[in-house]
Amino acid sequence: MTQTNTLAKSRSGSEGIPHVPMSGLETLWMQIGGTLCNLTCNHCFISCSPHNHNHEQMSLDQVKKYLAESKELGVKDYYITGGEVFLHPEIFEIIETILQYGPLNMLTNGTLIREDKAEKLREIQNRVDFPMTLRVSMEHFDETKNDAVRGPNAFRLALGGIRNLAQQGFSPILTITRSWEEDKDSEMESQFLQFLQENEVPTPRIKILPGFLLGQLAENQRAYQKEERVTDKCFENFDITSLQCASSRMATGKGVYVCPILVDHNFAKMGNTITETLRPFPLAHSACYTCRVTGMTCKNE
Ligand code: SF4
Ligand code: SF4
């Protein structure tokens, strides 16, 4: 029996909703790009697009405010995401500012990283002590399969971005949403690693993410079913503090949310400052089921 089936079977109407504790804030995510993206991937769980203004891009001032607070709270590392972060007119100032505080991980679709942008990233990296890591999202090493999800030219442009970064000595982590059966992971992994090697990425690395049945993926594939929820029983043999929401928060232009996955849901906004959000959160959403079943984290490891 799969783990998914075991979990589904373990539910009963009388079981309570588990609350994830805040076990110690380590990571601050910031939704720098808002929900604006130059692509319109048909599996985007927050339905980003060139016209989605649900979350606006964060201003440099907002970023600075959260950074100052995060320092007081002992945050160890930072992640920025969107939408697409390289659409932001102040992205390089934001990157350099964050790197004064700690290591930075950037999630991008890679399509806007032309040669001059990769050079600028190298210049910044050479000026600061903390490392920057880029994560470039693609769907497939096959152009047709990739562009079927990400749109025309997405493959060509993202590959150009990866090569430009590699040219500057960066090793972007290729991030892929799983579109195959889980037992094919190792076979797919080796093909993605080979794809990076062929494109001269110095240290090829990949990250495979599960699909969250939200936004575009819910529309184009299926939504969560009623029984796909977690209960206290689901955590009897699982350390709940290993969930990313036990040690991270997501700052946006509209306030601070529990995690990067639920930024489209008002109930997931926990406060306007990070400090206000350092309390337990009820895992009542079906997306929490995906985190529990897959042990998923949005972080690099
Ligand atoms: S999945 Fe990423 S690249 Fe695609 S639309 Fe959403 S934010 Fe943009
Ligand atoms: S979706 Fe995942 S990370 Fe977000 S609150 Fe639920 S379990 Fe935590």
Image (cartoon, helix red, strand yellow):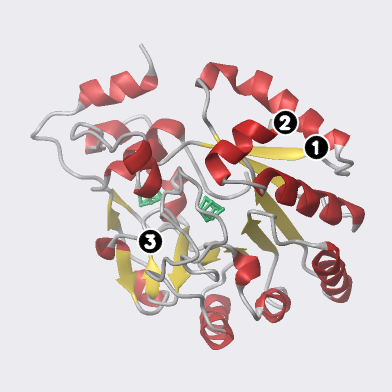
Specify the quadrant that holds the C terminus. Answer: top right
Q: Is residue 294 left or right of residue 86?
A: left
Q: Earlier in the sequence, mark 2 or mark 3?
A: 2
- Check whether the beta carbons of the residues at disc 1 and disc 3 lie within 8 A of each other: no
Q: Earlier in the sequence, mark 1 or mark 3?
A: 1
Q: Which kind of residue does numbered mark 3 sit on?
A: Val
Q: Which mark is residue 263?
A: 3
Mark 2 secondary-structure assignment: helix
Q: Residue at x 44, y 77 (%)?
A: 253
Q: Is residue 133 left or right of residue 301?
A: right
Q: Which kind of residue does numbered mark 2 sit on?
A: Phe
Specify the quadrant that holds the N terminus. Answer: top left
- Check whether the beta carbons of the residues at disc 1 and disc 2 lie within 8 A of each other: yes
Give 131 or 197, whichever is nearer the viewer: 197
The nearer-to-camera label among 1 and 3 is 1
Image x and y of residue 164, in percent: 85, 55
Does the closest atom of ligand 1 sit within 8 Å of the Cβ of label 1? no
Q: Residue at x 35, y 70 (%)?
A: 277
Label 1 sits on residue: 196
Residue 115 vs 8, above or below: the answer is below
Pick out the residue farthest to the bottom.
Answer: 61
Label 2 sits on residue: 192
